[in-house]
Image (cartoon, rainbow, N blue to C red):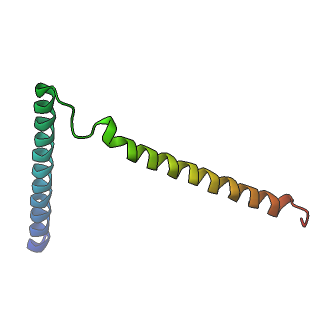
């Protein structure tokens, strides 16, 4: 093995270790915040009231996609079996 290859592997491992360490520390901070909120008896910032606009937006997007898919099915059906077929 060349020295260049070995150095690249060492660098890749170091980068992976740094990413893992950041992920673990972020996860610990999130869990600590959730636990402190639960102990205080308060609802977390992402309450049902805060999620409602996002839920409405997601539902509207699902309806739009369903309508778009249905219109595509209609076009495909008519192109295969319509009066000009």
Identity of the residue drawn at 57% across and 54% down: 64
The mark tally for this picture is 0
Above or below for 69 versus 49: below
Q: Is residue 53 left or right of residue 80?
A: left
Front residue of 6/42: it is 42
Front residue of 5/74: it is 74
Identity of the residue drawn at 42% across and 43% down: 55
Above or below for 20 versus 47: below
Q: Residue furthest front?
A: 49
Q: Where residue 10 appears, x then y in whole percent?
A: 9, 63
Q: Is residue 58 left or right of residue 7?
A: right
Identity of the residue drawn at 17% across and 30% down: 42
Instruction: Choose top left, top right, bottom left or bottom right for residue 17.
Output: bottom left
Tell me the quadrant of the picture where the C terminus can be found: bottom right
Instruction: Choose top left, top right, bottom left or bottom right for residue 38.
Output: top left
Q: Where residue 65 appears, x then y in whole percent?
A: 57, 54
Q: Where residue 80 appears, x then y in whole percent?
A: 82, 61
Instruction: Choose top left, top right, bottom left or bottom right for residue 72.
Output: bottom right
Tell me the quadrant of the picture where the N terminus can be found: bottom left
Identity of the residue drawn at 11% across and 27% down: 40
Above or below for 59 versus 69: above
């Amino acid at each position: 093995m060349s020295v260049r290859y070995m150095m690249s592997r060492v660098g890749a491992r170091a980068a992976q270790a740094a990413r893992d360490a950041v992920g673990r520390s972020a996860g610990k901070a999130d869990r600590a915040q959730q636990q402190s909120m639960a102990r205080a008896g308060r609802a977390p910032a992402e309450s049902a009231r805060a999620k409602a606009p996002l839920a409405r937006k997601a539902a509207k997007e699902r309806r739009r996609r369903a309508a778009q898919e249905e219109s595509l099915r209609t076009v495909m059906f008519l192109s295969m079996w319509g009066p000009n077929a």
